[in-house]
Image (spheres, grey):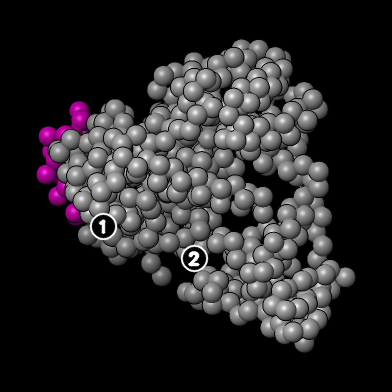
Amino acid sequence: MSTYRFYYDESEHSRKINYTTVSAINYYDNFVTMIVGWSSEKKDVLQRHAAFEEKYADRKDHNGEIKSTMFQQKQFRYGFASLNKQNAQFINDFLSLFDEEIHIYFSVVSKIEYLVLQLFQGYRNSFLIDADLMKYSITKALVTYRPKEIIKSLYESPEDFLEQLKKFFRDRIECNKRNQKLKQAETSAFQKILLVLDDISDSPELDWDYHMPFDGFKKYLGEKDIQNYILIIDKEGKEDEESKTLKVAREIGLDNSDEANSTRYPGLRIADMMVGIISKLLKGLCDSLRYKSLDESTNKKILSTGWFCLNEVQLELYKKLYQIICKWQPAWYKSYSGIYSDDLVLFNALLNFMNHFESVEQLREDIDMQGEYFNAFACEQLARYFNQRRCKLPIETVNSFDKDSYLNQQGRKVYSDSRKQPLLPLHESSQTFDVLSVGVDKNFVPSITILKDRDTVCFRIPEELSEWAFCVVGMANMGTNLFPSKVTFTCVGGKYYADIL
């Protein structure tokens, strides 16, 4: 069995989360981590990387390393379109180091969400309130608008934080009346938040938690069935002391972890460059779409034309990054985030949007409208994610069965491609089944597991019953699990009905 070597680095890490940190001009809300790795049998990666570093030897720092700090954020103001010829070629050569055999895992975690989670740690989902959506909405509001009074009170006068938060939401609801059609959903969310804020009294403890990124990587290893591995973490702090990062990795269960200096391990420099490129793209997107004032916030915000003024090399960078992130080594846990994942969703949307252009000429045909087109595409992706947050009982992978399927929690075979799952056989009458569970996969395809002839079998259900499936999944999410139960399915005139007995 092959041994895999993985390398970890991070970007936009605030060692201390305080008011000075959050209010800084260059502050970015997301803590981004990157892990790259490959089989020990694959020796060409480091050879190609050595040739790459030799080609760009003039870019080495005083430690003899080529690190992502060589790029300034302003060089990514319009994403890859802002890169000059030399930097575009550099990133092109770097991305060319990757192929289908290299594993990529990365996480994008909101720092403000972490504080919100501490504030609402006593709140759980119930039939009356979806606490996760409430936490998402509060985080999104604070990240989007960055109200100085609230952020300042969170650190300097926590006892005033809740009152400031209530005032902020009331003010936003009033402000949204200027454009009720655009802000209808936001106003509704804020009104629901105000209903529950009166019950909260505790102030959050402000200290960063490293567990989430490593928790996602552990899930990735399990999904890929990688058991023999070594994880090397970029060394921070004193040489003779274990870092908090390493301690947390081991607490999560990543026992084969150690830390080292990036001067000795080229794999760490590869992870550093990749996380630097991704975090700067993320930050560029965030800066371009963030409201600069509360008055501006009642208008639609779209990417400027500058993002789409690409040459062939710059467009190729998006296509290469799309392959690495979205196509090669596909996995559910390849990217990982918390409840608030808007920046990650937008980043993936940008890669998919740019990848669909076959040439620069095609992109320029309607360049003045590309911002609108991307906005519509990104909003669709965000809406899908938001709806997915409302259904938190997905069909979970439990054990790999073969390359095309896995076993669910009832031990039944489920196909990764939902289209291959057999359809529940229903005819023009009523049929009753013993339903053990209802689930929804990542593509929003519903299925049920039933008891049939003393055996459990998993089926897709007709699209016409999707709304019913989402409803019962949503109820289970709120604490009311209706299964196992007998369910009668009826087909009348091509229309389907489901009754839980």
The one nearer the camera, 278 or 129, is 129
Q: Position of residue 212 (x, y in %)?
A: 55, 43
**Type of amino acid at the residue the image marks with label 2:** Asp
**Type of amino acid at the residue the image marks with label 1:** Glu
Q: Position of residue 19 (x, y in %)?
A: 53, 17
Q: Magenta stretch containing residue 491, yes or no?
A: no
Label 2 element class: loop
- Which disc number belongs to residue 498? none
Q: Which residue is found at the position 52% from the left and 26% from the top? A: 297
Q: Looking at the image, can residue 6 be seen?
A: no
The one nearer the camera, 498 or 261, is 498
Q: Which residue is mark 1?
A: 358
Label 1 element class: loop
Magenta span covers which residues? 46-63
The quarter of the image holding the C terminus is bottom right
Q: Looking at the image, can residue 406 be seen?
A: yes
Q: Position of residue 21 (x, y in %)?
A: 48, 20
| Relative side of 309 to 378, left or right | left
- Which disc number belongs to residue 225? 2
